[in-house]
Image (cartoon, grey):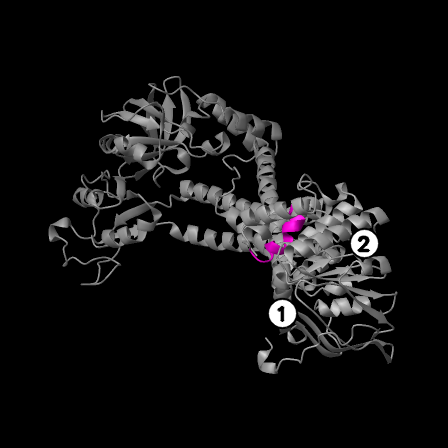
Amino acid sequence: MLRVEKITHSFKTGNEWTKVLHEISFAVKQGEMVALLGSSGSGKSTLLNLMAGLMKPTDGHIFIADHDIVLMGENKLAEFRRKNIGFIFQAYELITSLTVRENVELPLVFQSVSPSIRKQKALALLEQVGLPDKADLFPSQLSGGQQQRVSIARSLITEPSVIFADEPTGNLDSKTEEEIISILLKLNQTMKTTFIVVTHEQEVAEQMQRTFSLRDGYLINGQHTDVQPAPTEEESP
Amino acid sequence: MRIRDISRMAWDQVKRRKVVTGLCMTGISIGCAAIIVALSVGQSAQVYVTNEVNRNFKMDEITVTPGGGLPSPGGKGGGGGSGSGVNSNLDPGKLTFQKLKIIQGLKHVVAAAPFEDNGYRQMITVDNKIADIQVIATDLRMLNKFDKSFKQGGASDIPGMVVLNYGATLGLIDIETRQNIFDRMNSDPFNQEVSSQYNNLMLIPSEMYRQQVQLQAQDYSASAPNGTGPTKLSSPLQVGGILANPPGTSDDRATYEKVMYVSLETAAQLQHELSFTDANGTVPSLEEGKYNSVTVKVDSVDNIKPLEALIQKLSLSANDNLYQQEQLKEQFDTIKMAALGIGVFILVIASISIIVAMTMSTHQRRRQIGIMKVLGANMGQIRNMFITEAALLGLLGGLLGVLFSYLIVMALNKLVGTAGEGLSFFIPLTTLPIGLSFAIMTGVLSGIYPAISASRTDALTAIKRD
C-alpha cells in the first residue's frame, strides 16, 4: 500500500548540506496501523512530510497505491492528496471561521461533492468520533480533545488510502490521549484505513501494530520488512 | 470546486474580516460613486442644456422660406427640381398656401404654420398703458402645437382677436410715467435708483385677458425724421388668450419677449390700417396666399434632415438649428470623458488600498491557505477563492457607491433646488451598470496579485509552527 524506497533527504544550511534521512526503506500494508517513533530531531516529521507529498526528497521514491508521488507535479499531487491522503495534525488545524461540520466537509468541497452528500457524510463521521451534537459549533467552542476528534473525522471524509497523523496526542492530557488513540484504533479496525502515526511516546507506539524507529535519520528497526521492487517508469503515473 | 462553495467561502471571509472589508468597500464605493455622479451630472446638464437649447433654438423645427435656389434636375437633396414630381403650378421659389398644405401632409410633420414677423408696434390699452411689442401673424389655432400653452383663454378665428404671450402682459405703464422715467434716465444715466425703479415697473403684470387694445405706428421714414412723423392707430383688438410663461423662463427674461400673435386676416387688416406710403407713394400690402416664413414642427430631431430634403424639392429654403446640438454634443462628450477619467483615477487609487488590504489578508491567512492545500486544494482553487473575494468586495463597494451617488445627487438637487431653474440632477439607469462594472473590475484586477501570491503559498511552511 505504502512503499518507501531508499529515501534520502538533505537540507541546505548556509553553504553546507545536512543529511537528515539516510536511505530509508520500508513498506506498510493496506489497513495496517504503524508508528514512526523517534526523539526530537530524529527525522520522523520530515519523513512524514515526504510521504504526504508536502516535500520532495533529495533522492528515492515513495509509492502510495502504486503511484510514485515523488514524480508528481504540484497540482497533480494536490489532486492525489485530495483523494488518497488524510491528515491529522498535532495542533488540529481546524479553520476557525467554519463550523465543526463545515470543517469536516472541507476536503470534499475541493472535490466538488454536492452539499447534501457532504453533510450526510460529515454527520455520520462526527457520530463515529462521538461528536454528533457539536456539528454546528465553532472550533473555539470545543476542548482540545474534541477538536482533535473533528480533525480525525475530517481526515476520514474522503475515505483515503492512508492517514498520516503527526503527533496526534502531542497537545493533549493523558486521559484525552487514551481516548484519541482508542478512536484511531477503532476506526482502523472498522474502516480498514492505513494509519501512519508519528510519535515520540513509546506508550503510543506500543499500541500500534508495528513500529518503525528512527534515530539521527536512520531507520533502526523494520527497515527490511516487506520491501517490494520498485515499478518501472511506465507503471508510474 | 463549486461556484456556490467558492462564493460562500468568499462571503464568509468578507463578513468575518470587517475592517479589511470596510476599507476596501470605502475605497471602491468612492470611486464608483465618483464615476456615477460624474456621468449623471454630465448627463443631467446635457439634458438641461439640450432642453434649453431646444426651447430657445427650436431644434425640432425647420424654418422654411421662399426661394433657396432651384434644385438641380434629378439631384439628391438640396432641392428636388421643378421637373421631378413638382408641379409647375406650384409657383417655384415662392412659399404658397398650396406648398404649405403639401408640407403639412408630409410624414413626421407635427404641424406647419406661417410665422410672419410684422415688426414692432406700440400696444396701447384702454387705460392708456403702453408697451412695445412684436407682432407675429400666424394660424392662431396651431399655437398649441408649437409648444405654446394657454394660461388664459384660447385661440379664435374671429378677426380682431389676438393672443399675447406672458411677456406682453408685463411692464405695461402709462405714457406719462414712462416718459418721466425715460427723461430721468437720460438726464442721469448712472442713477441706480431710477434704473431699479424702471426694472421693477417692467416686472409688474397687468390683467390683459379679454381687454381691448390698439396698435400704434409712427412714420419713421426720411420725410419724418427724429420721431416727428405722424402716427396711425389700429382699430380695437380683443385679447382672446394669454400664453403661459414657458417653464424655466424667468419674469426678467420674459420682459424681453413681448409678442402679440394675430391671425393672417387680422395681420392684413393691420397692414392696411398702420402702413405709411413708401417712396413711390404706394402702401405695401401682404400678398394673399403667399408667406415669407413657415415653421415646421417635426416629431423627432432625427427626421429633420430627411424632411428638409423633401421641402427643398419644393424649391424652398429649409434651415434648422441642429448645428447647435452637434456643438453641444462635442462639448458634453469631452466633459463626460473628463468626468470618467476622474472616476477611474479614484478607482485606481482605491485599487491600491485593496491590493494592500488583500495582501495583508493573504499574509494573515497563510496558515489557513496551508491547511487547505494540505487537504487537497490546488493552486487554481485557492486563486479563485481570493479573486472571488476581491470581486465580491468590488460588488459590495459598487453597491455602496450606488447608494452614495443617490445621496450625492439628492444633496446636489437640494443645493441647486431654488437657484437652478429647471435644472435637476438625475442618475440615468445606464450609469449604474457602468459604475458597478468598474467597481467589480477594480476588485478583480486588484485581487489578482494577492490571489496569485496566496496560491503560491508553500503549504508546509504555512502550517509549520515555531
Q: Position of residue B125 (x, y in %)?
A: 37, 21
Report the amino acid beneath label 1.
Ala
Residue B62 is labelled as: none
Q: Position of residue B128 (x, y in %)?
A: 40, 19
A169 to the left or right of B454: right
Residue at 83% across, 65% down: A37
Do the residues under discs 1 and 2 have CB atoms within 8 angstroms?
Answer: no
Please identify the quadrant where the N terminus of chain B is shown. bottom right
* Identity of the residue furthest to the top in this view: B127
Q: Position of residue A103 (x, y in %)?
A: 67, 49
The residue pinned by badge 2 equals A169
Q: Which residues are magenta?
A: A101-112
Report the amino acid beneath label 2.
Thr
Going from the N terminus, do you reach mark 1 or mark 2 first? 1
Residue A65 is labelled as: 1
- Label 2 is found on which chain of the structure? A
- Label 1 is found on which chain of the structure? A
Of helix, strand and loop, which one carries label 1?
loop
B308 to the left or right of A70: left
